[in-house]
Image (cartoon, rainbow, N blue to C red):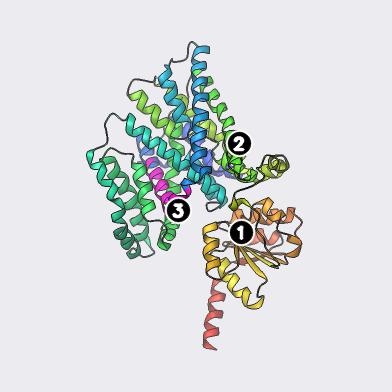
Amino acid sequence: MIEPILVGLAFVAGLAFRRAGMPPLLGYLSAGFLAGGLQIGDAEVIHTLSEVGIILLLFTIGLKLNIRELLAPQIWATASLHTAIVVPLTAGMLLGLVWLMPSVEAIDTSVAWMLAFALSFSSTVFAVKIFDERGEGAALHAKIAIGILVVQDIFAVTYLVFSAEQAPSPWAFALLALPLLRPLLVFLLKQAGHGELLILFGIAVALGSAELFEMVHLEGGLGALLFGVLLSNISKSVELYKGLINFKDIFLTAFFLSIGYAGLPSGEMLLVALAIGGLILLRPLIYFTLLVMFRLRARTSLLVGLSLFNYSEFGLIVAAMAVKGGQLPAAWLTTLAVAMALSLFIAVPFNTHVHSLYARLATRLQKMERSELLLQERPVDLGDAEILIFGMGRIGSGAYDYLSQHYPNKIIGVEESADKALKLRLAGRLCVPGDASDRDFLERADLHRRKTVLVSLTNHAENVDVVKLLQQLNYQGRIAVVSRFPDQHEELTRMGCITFNLYAEAGHGFAERVMEELV
């Protein structure tokens, strides 16, 4: 079992980093190194829990994945070109370090290329965590980043299949019939209701699919991803996704803890870890250049590049396989674990302050954009709307319908998911795709013509960021924001917003609806 002291240590460290304005995951990483050094907890148990977290993560990615999006050049070509650029650079650096430091555990050329390939990938866990915390999971930059990570996962699975000691079972061909299971899975999903049975169904499918793939000697994570895809694109899958988010995050805490259990390298191997960690600084520059080349805006390219600004857990998997096979000295596994942790420590501050960073660099970065941008990156026209609604979920759509009765043709919704915006337009609502936290979007929105802005985004932090951005742009109209808890209500009120407490005032709205029917 996990010792309570380890759970407490993770909580205290996470809380300390949060109070310092940093994401809690840095606290979990620090707690992992401290616990590993003090030999607190069972490393095997932590590793098992982290594997469950990764499986749930890949399953939830599948629930929201549109396979057709992977075919876009800005996704598959960017992933491929990045790998082609980074692998030779990394292999050359590894061989150079071994040559410059004779006391470093030697590796041959083939192993250097293998490690370079493994280190070319970015962490899916980190990117999804960052997007979830910022409430940007449906934004274009998040979809592109996740798409690149899925392509990298395909590269990784292909490598593992061909490098594994045990070839895939002939029964693996039976997995080609998986689409035939979709009707049954969808039926069971709809029958699961809305409570704990729904969550249990999701966990069972995620873990069961991973076990099924491992039975035929394929990567279990691939099974979870594909079964998630089988359940995607139906309304019930959205509810399942939301129900699994917190479970996924709890298990992923174990993933960040597990990195520290590898310990710290000694002597010159620590310098090697620092050098590998430092090499990560090139990654966002490479991604930015490639994405701008594929006609994405500077802002989108920067956000994608910084979200992939780290090393993947896949590097540790490949290193562990090489150590087990006698190809790699054991000291390298610890070295790579430290390099991965270092890359996360470097990446977090950049991602935490990415919007303010872009605000400072926007003028220079925009000069690098192509003259003709992708269609989904071009400015949208908000027309003569006097009321903007940011976030067209259930609350935003409800507000749109109500206000349209009193202010016809004066309202427009802004939704960060282009697919959802299209569905809303087909349903008769005036809605455009756009990111409320996008400074460029707001600067082109002619805010002086808008009398009121309603903000109803996925989380409180994102709502606050949008309010701050509107105030920085000197917006003089009224800002109304949805809150869910009293402390959020108080913070938004202090910022000068009209605030609607979703839970506290829901009863009032319910009573009004009943009175309308009675009259």
Q: Where does the magenta region start and end?
A: 51-69
Q: Nearer the viewer, residue 488 or 450?
A: 450
Is 158 located above or below residue 454 in the figure?
Answer: above
Image mark for residue 64: 3
* Closer to viewer: mark 3 or mark 2: 2
- Circles 1 and 2, Cβ within 8 Å, touching? The answer is no
- Across and down, in percent, residue 417 comes to 54, 57
Q: Main secondary structure of the magenta part?
A: helix
Quarter of the image where the N terminus is located:
top left
Membership of 190 in magenta stretch: no
Residue type highlighted by circle 1: Gln
Q: CA distance from mark 1 to mark 2?
A: 39 Å
Image mark for residue 65: none
- Across and down, in percent, residue 404 comes to 62, 74
> 174 left or right of 124?
left
Q: Earlier in the sequence, mark 3 or mark 2?
A: 3
Q: CA distance from mark 3 to mark 2?
A: 27 Å
Residue type highlighted by circle 2: Thr
* Closer to viewer: mark 1 or mark 2: 2
Q: Please identify the residue farthest to the front as the structure is shown.
A: 372
